[in-house]
Image (cartoon, rainbow, N blue to C red):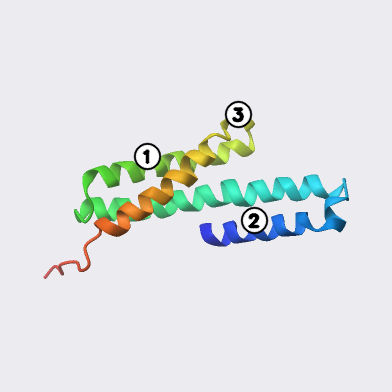
Amino acid sequence: MAPINFAASACVLWVMASPAVAQNSVVLPALYYFHITIGGVGFAVPMALFMAGVCIPAAFMKLLPKWIVIFGLILAGTGALSWFSMIFPKTCFLIPLTIFPSVIWMIATGFALPRTAERST
């Protein structure tokens, strides 16, 4: 869901750049807030669910180092709380605190995950 929301946000931004839309002062603010919602909260919350969904089983199965699991769970908590920015604009700082470090987390997770997992009998 996170990449789909990011792509939809980019499409809305492309529409906003169209000269006919950019000159329309009635439609432009609505598209701007839609773009921010889809690309901000719409990315951070699904990314938080993804990180929690990877970290929790990886912690139980000991597939990832402890620091990656803790880092992912902290980011997941930050991302889950980022929806408050739709109600309280002062909490908008939670969105970039989720989006940018999540890229680092995904790279670290990709390198740290084992290629194969042992099967339990």
Q: In this rendering, does residue 116 appear at all?
A: yes
Q: Position of residue 92 (x, y in %)?
A: 58, 35
Q: Nearer the viewer, mark 2 or mark 3?
A: 2
The three-letter code of the residue at mark 1 reads Ile
The residue drawn where x is 49% and y is 53% is 46
Please, what secondary structure does the residue beneath circle 1 have? helix
The residue carrying mark 2 is: 9
Residue sitting at the far left: 121
Please, what secondary structure does the residue beneath circle 2 have? helix
Q: Which mark is residue 74?
A: 1
Label 1 neighbour load within 10 Å: few <14, some 14-19, many 20+: some
Please, what secondary structure does the residue beneath circle 3 have? helix
The three-letter code of the residue at mark 3 reads Lys
The three-letter code of the residue at mark 2 reads Ser
- Relative to 103, is 45 on the left or the right? right
Q: Earlier in the sequence, mark 3 or mark 1?
A: 1
The residue carrying mark 3 is: 90
Q: Nearer the viewer, mark 2 or mark 1?
A: 2
Q: Position of residue 78 (x, y in %)?
A: 45, 39
- State how far apart marks 2 and 1 are (Cα): 25 Å
Q: Nearer the viewer, residue 112 or 49?
A: 112
- State how far apart marks 2 and 3 are (Cα): 22 Å
